[in-house]
Image (cartoon, rainbow, N blue to C red):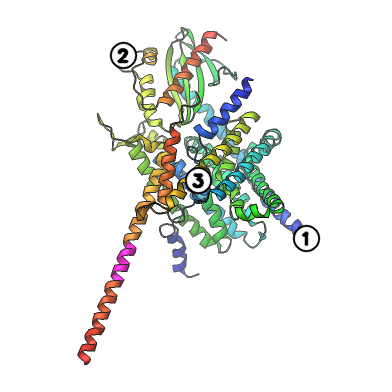
Amino acid sequence: MNYLAAFLLAIVSYSLVSNVVLSRFYGICSFIGVGNKIKSAASMGIAVSFVIIMAALICYPIYNFILVPAGVPYLDTITFILVIASLVQVVGLFIKKFSPSLYKALGIYLPLITTNCAVLGVVSENTASKLDFGMSMANAIGTSIGFLVVIIIYACIRERLESSNVPKAFKGIPIALITAGIMAIAFLGLSGLIG
Amino acid sequence: MAKGEHKQSFIAGIIAENPLFVSLLGMCPALAVTKSLESAIGMGILFTIVLVCSNVLVSLLRKVIPEEVRTPCFIVIIATFVTLTKMFTEAFLPELYSSLGVFLSLLVVNCIILGRSEAFASKNGVLDSFLDGIGNGIGFLMAICLIALFREVLGTGQLTFGNTFTFIADAHNGEPIKLWILKGEGYDVSFSIFSTPAGGFLVLGITLAIMAAINNMKANKKKVDARIKAQKAKEEAAKKREVAQ
Amino acid sequence: MKIDWKSSFKIALIITAIASVGAITIALTNVLTEPIIKQNRAQREQNGLKKVFGDNATFGDKVELKEDKYQYLQAYYPVNIDSSSARVYSTKGTNAYGDVALLVGLNADFTIYNIAVMENTESYAVTLKENYLDYLINPKDKKTHEQAFEDTSVKCGATYGAKLVKDMINQAKEHYKEGK
């Protein structure tokens, strides 16, 4: 029971306290580029979440049961990125076959998930901090939840921003970044949440 | 290619097509390692090394790599160079390695390196790719140093040299060099919000807004000048017609 | 789906070739740099131990710790200084703002002998260092390290970093008191 409590607390910690976008700075390019459409933001968030969880699930045994016993832990970066690239290809093929409308809605974002820092970042963190399997999955699940929450909130805010009177120099990306900064300050208030 | 065009691809990467400020790529390391000026300089140098090496290798192999799998091939080449850089940094500059943390591994999926490989190095010769790599690298280095300068000065009130590059501290009798700007004996007007992750977003947003404002002023000036010229031309034409009548 | 075996084979071959060349280069570099890395780490530990206890102390063998109750403690060295025994604990803690790693030297009566900072990558690293860690290492007004640690009137601008440091030192003390 103690481990389950630690697992759930870890999920909350990784999703809110050290939020993937606003505190750890992964996945910013896709975060800023998603624009103001809530539906496409949600679908991209779900796709990224799925890839993060599957990548963490696959890379943990590969690192701990293949690379480390073979004495080559330094080949982790190459192996992880190849796994992630093939995973994204496979996920794309599946989506194309089973739901062509979702595939069209995702459009350019799907191949871009390969270069999303969040996926490689979570997997690298898991190996660098030598987390065990439960904590690695807590990291992955927490990161996915955090990414979804933040990206949907951000899309809603940016939708409102479209119709407001922004000074000319700030139009577009600068005001989007400052909005993200204010969200980061808000999430800073959650930092004492877990012990 | 003529010599002028070589220089063109080099200079373009620094200001006109600065990868961070104009193309808005590679923001993840730009916000994460700019807590202190030293780690930003270190990251910029390592970034340039990886970019130049991978550009040159991709350009050498551009006839061999098949079209369908060029992205995975580029990624493998970049990952190799990133791992080599990581190993050398851990061996020779361990403080820089621990301050950059996981973002050194994340150079593998950096949009700038992948973008330059795909857009430039796979289509141009070795010398141009080399110059393009150096140009973009210097542009990125200058951009993140600018952001780091603001974040460190505003956030901690002082510039510290010697925490990450310990050879500076060793040359200065073991203590890092500190330049006190917003902080000193008895006064402290630094805003520590800029040391937090939120500060990164704010500094980058305000910098981009300032650059957009400067561009707007330049564009306005051009428009106003063009209008004045058109006005003058009309007056000249009207005067000529009067004289002719 | 018709699969073009010849071109697929060629593609797979090229990727494998590039990946293997990369892997071999990395392996060779590893052979070059691994001994240097190990040496650097050992050197840094020795320097840290010297910073805590000074030059005329002898250190015993390192004892690795990996208990769940003491999650910040990595290892300890038994120390012999001025003919009395002591211990120095190597601690490392992480919170939402970054990592802190300390070497905590404890006397036989469980008071603090000295502290050395090995790693400080918090967001508020400079604030933590100047307002709290420097005060613990060089206390003003001729206080001892233990008095500086017990002083509750210290104002530090990095609350969570200071709490982490306090927790790490307290854990080291608890472990020493248990006498294991």
Tell us which disc is closer to us: 2 or 1.
1
The CA distance from mark 3 to mark 2 is 49 Å
> Which chain hosts label 2?
C
In the picture shown, does residue C118 fall above or below A53?
above
Residue A132 on the magenta span = no
> Which chain hosts label 1?
C
In the picture shown, does residue C171 fall above or below B244?
above
SS class, disc 1: loop
Residue A51 can be seen, yes or no? yes
Whether pointer 3 and pointer 2 mark residues with C-beta atoms closer than 8 Å, the reply is no
Q: Name the residue under label 2.
A: C142
> Which chain hosts label 3?
A
Q: Which residue is drawn at 32% across and 67% down?
A: B222
Please state the horizontal and vertical placement of residue A64, each as a whole percent of the image: 68, 33
The CA distance from mark 2 to mark 1 is 81 Å
Q: Mark 3 points at which residue?
A: A28
Please state the horizontal and vertical placement of residue B13, each as a whole percent of the image: 45, 58
User: Label for residue C4?
Assistant: 1
